[in-house]
Amino acid sequence: MSTSPKAGLEALLTPEESVLVLIDHQPYQFANLHSHEPMMVTNNVVGLAKAAKGYGVPTILTTVVEERGGLLIQQLQDVFPDQKPINRTFINTWQDQVVVDAVKATGRKKLIIAGLWTEICVAMPAIQAAGEGFDVYAVTDASGGVTAEAHDMAVQRMIQAGVVPITWLAVMGEWQRDWARTDRITPEDQLAALEHAGATGIATAWEQQLLNTPVAHDAPDAQPVR
């Protein structure tokens, strides 16, 4: 089991320590997704992927039997257009040595997972990896199950195994940590990710508009508006 702290500053995520694995966001899995709106999961996982790309977090894409279950959804593939997802036969991603080797090659121990379905394709690798010394974080709103109960029970089971549940925007907040930080992500990349953050994204775009709008100066003889 991991000996890393579950509280304190070191328990928070950093881009330098993180590796992201996105599992089975494919048409077959979306077809029986009922714990969340499919549009919401799509939005959230794409936002998470864009954030990871912007912060330089290694991201591994994987599918299961894609010749039957379908290719990775295009919105997610478009974030990493040059990366071919690792296509597995193992239901449990952590039993596929190609995926495990790709994670271990990064040298990072904070493993962030999102996928479909939560009760199977997220819980199984999360529980196994946690038992092998990784600090595992399950992104619950970029994942989903066949029912709300299935999703919730999976999250509870993972917590019992030491996995930390987290939402995608919280992941991005921990990666950012300081609004003055510009060493890991450009404002353009940050805005691209936050476009998926609902009202927060709208407000951020508005802030950028205001910051980039020249301030009008009154002419010397201008009269106040009454």
Image: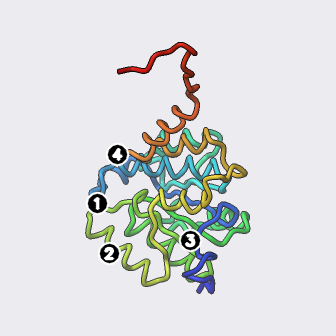
Q: Give the spatial CA distance, label 4 vs label 1.
A: 12 Å
Q: Amino acid at mark 1?
A: Ser
* Percent coordinates x, y for residue 1 in the rendering: 59, 86
Residue that carries the numbered disc 3 in the rendered image: 95
Residue that carries the numbered disc 2 in the rendered image: 153
Q: Give the spatial CA distance, label 2 vs label 3.
A: 22 Å
Q: Residue at x 60, y 57 (%)?
A: 176
Q: How many marks?
A: 4
For label 2, the crowd category at 10 Å Cα-Cα, with few meaning under 14, some 14 to 19 and many 20 or more, is some
Question: Which comes sooner in the sequence, label 2 or label 4?
Answer: 4
Question: Which comes sooner in the sequence, label 3 or label 4?
Answer: 4
For label 3, the crowd category at 10 Å Cα-Cα, with few meaning under 14, some 14 to 19 and many 20 or more, is some
Mark 3–mark 4 CB contact (< 8 Å)? no
Mark 2–mark 3 CB contact (< 8 Å)? no
Which element carries disc 2, helix, strand or loop?
A: helix
Q: What label does residue 205 carry, if any?
A: none
Q: Is residue 12 above or below residue 61?
A: below
Q: Give the spatial CA distance, label 3 vs label 4.
A: 29 Å
Q: What label does residue 35 carry, if any?
A: 1
Which quarter of the rendered picture does the C terminus lie within? top left
Q: Is residue 112 above or below residue 49?
A: below
Question: Which comes sooner in the sequence, label 1 or label 3?
Answer: 1
Question: Which comes sooner in the sequence, label 2 or label 1?
Answer: 1
Mark 4–mark 1 CB contact (< 8 Å)? no
Question: Which comes sooner in the sequence, label 2 or label 3?
Answer: 3
Q: Give the spatial CA distance, label 2 vs label 4.
A: 22 Å
Q: Amino acid at mark 4?
A: Met
Residue that carries the numbered disc 4 in the rendered image: 39
Q: Amino acid at mark 2?
A: Met
